[in-house]
Image: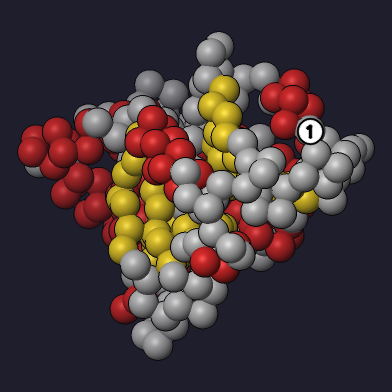
Amino acid sequence: MAEETQQYEHMAQGGFAASYWQNKIDKSGLGYDLYLSTAEFLDKLRHRMDTNFPVKESSILFSPHLFAPDLNPGHARTKQNSLVSRGIVLDIEKGDMSPDDYLRSFPELEMVIYSSFSHTPEAPRYRICLPTTHYMPPYVNEAICHMIARKLSDRRHGIDSQTFDCASLFYLPSKTDHSFIEHHHEGRQPLNPFDWIEQCPLEVWQAIDAVEEIRQRPDYQLTVNTSGFLAYMEQRWRSAPLGHGRTEFWFLAQGLKKLGWDAYKIRAKLEDEVIYANSPAESESEIDALMLSI
């Protein structure tokens, strides 16, 4: 297990995952990067920015989600086979907020911003890529996208909410008359998903159809053990309020990691705890993604 820990140590900083696709109807994909540091991700974007394509469809597309075809045989990119994601990507168009406006609105967040193919100074179109500190289940990625849009609800932010779905793809950049790419990191940090979902309102979970009711086993007795972190994490998960089950299952996994448990012991514990979920089979199917996220 020590080897497994060392293998993922370099991923503790902010970064991205990326799967690559020839076009929007591609059923098999062009491969993936399990982890890209923000610098590596930026290098890939800059390399693509050196190429001039006649039409945007000539470029390939990417997603911050990684997919497991065997979870939904016969389909390439669906909620059912989206395994895990890292990094947040926002598609901005038809709004009145400039990149500088976004930087002022989220002064704490590191951002990579690049122009879309059809971007012009008169009609700005661009993408904002936010490195994250952890891998995320797909529904957490979607929830954070909604949270960002909600924070800007009083502005014409231009965020395309249709791209929040994990099946969405984004064109890599290409060279045009008005193309640009920027990296803003001084005094900023990668987005920490745990910090964000801790503040996620129930309305967002309902909007993405992630509400889950936690049931209690008949023999479960509520206990309070303020001196035991494990007891606290168990109690928090098992007594999670309506709409917070999936989130608390994720926090349980993170808590076990903080206790110093190895990957084998964490997985075994999560498998034991799924009985407390409203849908044990669904919670069990998310364990692989949770193990990557910690």
Task: Locate residue 185 relative to residue 285 in the image: left or right.
Answer: right
Q: How is the image coloured?
A: secondary structure
Q: Is residue 130 above or below residue 273?
A: above
Q: Is residue 280 above or below residue 270?
A: below
Q: Secondary structure at mark 1?
A: loop
Q: Residue at x 16, y 49 (%)?
A: 264
Task: State which quarter of the image contains the C terminus.
Answer: top left
Q: Is residue 173 above or below residue 192?
A: below
Task: Locate residue 245 relative to residue 241 in the image: left or right.
Answer: left
How many numbered tags mark residues here?
1
Q: Residue 125: x and y, percent?
A: 74, 47
Using the image as rendered, state which of residue 176 and residue 143 is in the foreground: 176
Q: Residue 16: x and y, percent?
A: 42, 42
Q: Which residue is mark 1?
A: 98
Q: Residue at x 31, y 78 (%)?
A: 70
Task: State which quarter of the image contains the N terminus.
Answer: top left
Name the amino acid type tagged 1.
Answer: Ser
Residue 31, quarter of the rendered image = bottom left
The extreme top residue here reads 187
Using the image as rendered, state which of residue 230 and residue 205 is in the foreground: 205
Residue 114, quarter of the rendered image = top right
The reply to whether residue 152 is in sight is no
Using the image as rendered, state which of residue 185 and residue 4 is in the foreground: 185
Q: Residue 107: x and y, percent?
A: 67, 19
